[in-house]
Every structure is written in C-alpha cells, then in structure tokens.
Image (cartoon, helix red, strand yellow):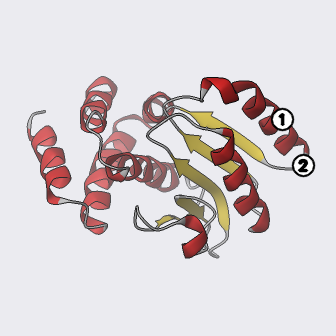
C-alpha cells in the first residue's frame, strides 16, 4: 500500500469522533510499528480508554517499554488541543516514574496556552525531560515513509489488532474493516 493510501485510510478512520478509541488505536498501532521495525523498544502497553493513568499507575496513555519492562517513552493521545494542564499532569507522572521522553499527539495546542506550553517544554528539557508535541498523522507520514511498505502494512494490521484486542465498540471495528475492504 502506498504512503498516501495508508494515510488516507487512517485519516478517514479518525474523522469520526470516538471518545478516544480510534485515536488511541491508531497511535498505538503507529508506535507498535515503530518498535517492531526500528527496534527502539519491545512493546507498547496501554490501558482501557476510560482508565485514568493515575489509577493504572501508567505514565501516559501508551508506554513503550524495553525487554526488561522499563518505560522508554510515554505517549499521551488527545483528540483535541493540548492544554498546559495536560502537559503539567503528564510531566509530573513521568517524572515520578523516571520517564524522560514524552510524546503528545493532539489536534494542536490551545491558543491561549501556547506561550506557557512552549516555556514549560523548555524548562522540562532543562530538567532532563524531552517533550514532543505533534499531530498524529503528520508524524506518521515521516515514519511510514522511512519504513516503506513493510511498516505501512504493520501499521494497518496493528490498527485492527488494537481495535480487536481492546474490545473497542463493534461499530469502530466494522468501520475499519469497511475502509480496508475499499482499498
């Protein structure tokens, strides 16, 4: 599958709001594919979409862990604009769990928080935390291009695996199946 077709399928799938289910499945699939193809970590852990990170003891929505189970990087998935409160909460959890690399996927950054977020990211870096904010499919474009057809196939398969493995609502799984059948 070409890069453009893979991204179009994912974009179409994400166009329907799902309370975070679709976004988290796509993001987890991307990081699963990164781990599998580039060997940066052994697995991606996640909890149910409605479970709070604090309640599960996790650093973020997704944790990319090495073979020993140590968190290599944390990923927060937002289907809205990132706020300073979001950033602060995740930085605190990650600091407590000694996670240094933190990714946020978001629509963008809340306009009135933009300067404070930029300043906070700079101060987090100075204290040893690396924070990255990106739009999911913009980030995916680069990764899926570098990894070529093999990573694109893994990415699309992993979306389905995430939808099935986390028992996401049948309408979302059916929508994914229908989109794939159309290519």
On the image, the x and y values in percent for residue 62 come to 52, 58
Q: Is residue 76 above or below residue 119?
A: below
- Label 2 sits on a secondary structure element that is loop
- Label 1 sits on a secondary structure element that is helix
In the depicted view, which residue is nearer to us: 156 or 12?
A: 12
**Horizontal relation, residue 149 to residue 105: left or right:** left
Q: Is residue 51 above or below residue 40?
A: below
- Closer to the N terminus: mark 1 or mark 2? 1
Question: How many callouts does the rendering have?
Answer: 2
Q: Quadrant of the N terminus?
A: top left
Q: Is residue 67 above or below residue 102?
A: below
On the image, the x and y values in percent for residue 114 come to 69, 26
Q: Which residue is mark 1?
A: 122
For the point 43% across and 47% down, the residue is: 27
Q: Quadrant of residue 112?
A: top right
On the image, the x and y values in percent for residue 145 come to 44, 29
Within 10 angstroms of label 2, few (less than 14), some, or many (20 or more) residues?
few
For the point 83% across and 44% down, the residue is: 124
Q: Which residue is mark 2?
A: 127
For the point 76% across and 44% down, the residue is: 130
The reply to whether discs 1 and 2 touch (Cβ–Cβ < 8 Å) is: no
Q: Is residue 68 above or below residue 148?
A: below
Which numbered disc covers residue 141? none
Q: Which residue is outermost to the right?
A: 126
Q: Quadrant of residue 137?
A: top left
Q: Quadrant of the C terminus?
A: top left
On the image, the x and y values in percent for residue 154 come to 34, 49
Within 10 angstroms of label 1, few (less than 14), some, or many (20 or more) residues?
some
Q: Which residue is outermost to the front?
A: 112
Cα gap from disc 1 to disc 2, whole angstroms: 9 Å
């Amino acid at each position: 599958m070409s890069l453009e077709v893979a991204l179009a399928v994912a974009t179409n799938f994400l166009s329907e709001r799902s309370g975070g289910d679709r976004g988290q499945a796509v993001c987890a699939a991307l990081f699963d594919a990164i781990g599998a193809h580039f060997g940066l970590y052994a697995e991606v852990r996640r909890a149910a979409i409605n479970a709070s990170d604090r309640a599960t003891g996790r650093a973020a929505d997704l944790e990319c862990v090495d073979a020993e189970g140590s968190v290599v990087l944390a990923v927060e998935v937002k289907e809205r604009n990132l706020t300073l409160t979001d950033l602060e909460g995740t930085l605190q959890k990650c600091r407590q769990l000694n996670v240094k690399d933190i990714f946020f996927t978001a629509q963008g950054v809340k306009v009135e928080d933009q300067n404070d977020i930029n300043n906070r990211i700079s101060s987090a870096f100075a204290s040893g935390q690396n924070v990255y904010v990106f739009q999911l499919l913009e980030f995916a474009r680069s990764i899926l291009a570098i990894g070529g057809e093999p990573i694109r196939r893994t990415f699309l398969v992993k979306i389905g695996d995430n939808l099935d493995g986390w028992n996401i609502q049948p309408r979302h799984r059916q929508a994914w199946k229908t989109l794939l059948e159309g290519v």
